[in-house]
Amino acid sequence: MTESKKLYISEIILISRKKETARRIKFDPERTIITGTNHTGKSSLLKSIYWTFGAEPIFNKRFKEDNILSLVKFELNNVPYEIIRDGRQIAVFDYNGNLIHKSQSITNDLAPFLSKLFNFYPLFPKQDGTFIIPPPAYLFLPFYIDQDKSWSNTWVSFNNLNLIKGYKKLVINYHSGFLPNEYYNLNKEKEIFLQKQSELEKEYNMTSKILTDISEKLSDATFNIDINTFKDEIKKLLVEYEILKTKEDKLKNVLLDLHHLKMMYEVQIDLITNAILESNKDLSFATNVLEEHIDCPMCGTHFENSFLERFEIAQDEEKSRDLLLDMKSELKDIESRISKEADKLNSNTVELSKINELLESKQGNIKLKDVIESNGRNQVKQIFDERKSDLIYEITVIKEELVELEKNIKKFKDRKRKQELDSFYSSKMSSFIRKLDIYTLSDDSYSTFNKQIDNLETGSSKPRVLMAYYFAFLHLIQEYSTTCFCPIIIDSPNQQDQDEFHLDKIYSFINANQPTNSQMIIGAAEVFENELEGHKIILTEKFALLNEQEYPAAIAEVSNKLFLLYD
């Protein structure tokens, strides 16, 4: 089984260029507690971590309106990286500050890149049935307990999760380790072999048909193939193709000239129209403004301005109107010519297309004839017989590979393996619900890791049941899964007005049952000295997570990365 990776978040920088404020937060490798009263920005800070990686948590409106850009410093198996996000623009940098990826599309571009970085390779179906490597939200889903939804339902911490059809079951099977990366890699390999098998079987059927046809023709004494006939036909087609191509070029040039002429007439008609409207200025306008030559406004082509002479003759309004009518009539003639030439060009294009199709067909036929001619009548059957035998062998080898692959795939769905995962999960659940003072759940309600527990409890006990579930699943991931183990982020564990006794149970449970060697970040409204162990960061200003003092240093640090992001 592939060794799983481990993600560690070391720092986040949040910047509002709109307000010229910023905030830098450094995280402890083991546990950080972000504490403060309501509206001091705890949740927004935690959500910003995932948002930077391309997930879409549920932000409040005020925070979104500040147009925050964020930079997260992280380590993956002790190798440092940085990721920056500004709107939909995201860029990733290596430990030397070199840009290694940038993207505007999370699903189509960022997700495949991060899948390689995090060793996250499941293939999940979209609602339209096509399969994709899922976006980053599906990687982080088991590790984020969101204050807005996660304390009432499971696997709902991010927006737009319904992009994946039946995502909950797929995420549970993947992250639990029941259907890990190896399972999806084997399925990819299986699809490649199935496609190759299909191609070989098509070739086999075609070869068999050709062999049958050739056998029949070889038995015919009049069997004869005239290669020169095919070659002569192709030569004639090529000559016809060149004639049509030359004609096409001439038609395009004629059309171009006509369009230039049309534009010149349109300019002149506008000038006459204006002159009629200002009849007292028309002659001086034509004399002083119009030049002896006119350039096409679109292409710059140079035309003699015979129009100027005609305009000088039309010195009164009536003659100007007559000239205007003449010009419009001539313009209609030009437009008619343009239409006719365009029809000729379209017709010529159709003929070219037909010649192309005939050429491809003839050239395809002559290949077979050349083979037959070069090998001789008596060798043809032997050639196709040998190819048929080769195809049978190749198809047999692929079928054997598919049988072996199917065995390996079935190992992940083996009943004993499923029972092993269920046993581990149920034992953790049994232990955890007792520690959290839950005694109403039946053993059957958590007998398997893929059972839904959202509606098993109500009231103040429900958050504690969900806490037990999340931690049981995290321990299952650590024990059996190949997924990248990410920082565990818990937002506001004090839900449903827990009394002092049960709140103490929750905090003691977190202290004692955090998975080994994992990083945890907790957001809590008020934490007393001995309740939650870990490095504490206290937020004090309401509606002011960011401040002006940190802005100069923060913007200076990210400026070069922003330049590379938008370069």
Image: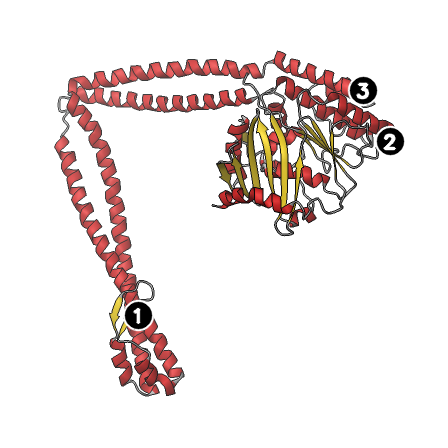
Question: Is residue 374 left or right of 181 when viewed as pictured?
Answer: left
- What residue is shown with label 1? 264
The answer to which image quadrant residue 193 occupies is top left
- For the residues labelled 1 and 3, the Cα–Cα distance comes to 90 Å
User: Of the residues shown, which amino acid type is indicated by label 2?
Assistant: Asp
Residue at horizontal 35%, vertical 84%? 282
Q: Amino acid at mark 3?
A: Arg
Tell me which numbered mark, 2 or 3, is placed earlier along the sequence: 3
Point 30% across, 74% down: residue: 329
Q: Is residue 240 left or right of residue 320?
A: left
The numbered disc on residue 434 is 3
Instruction: Give the quarter of the image for residue 120.
Output: top right
Label number found at residue 499: 2
Q: Position of residue 185 (x, y in %)?
A: 50, 22
Q: Are marks 1 and 2 in contact (CB under 8 Å)?
A: no
Rounded to the nearest whole Å, what is the CA distance between mark 2 and mark 3? 17 Å
Tell me the element at label 2. loop
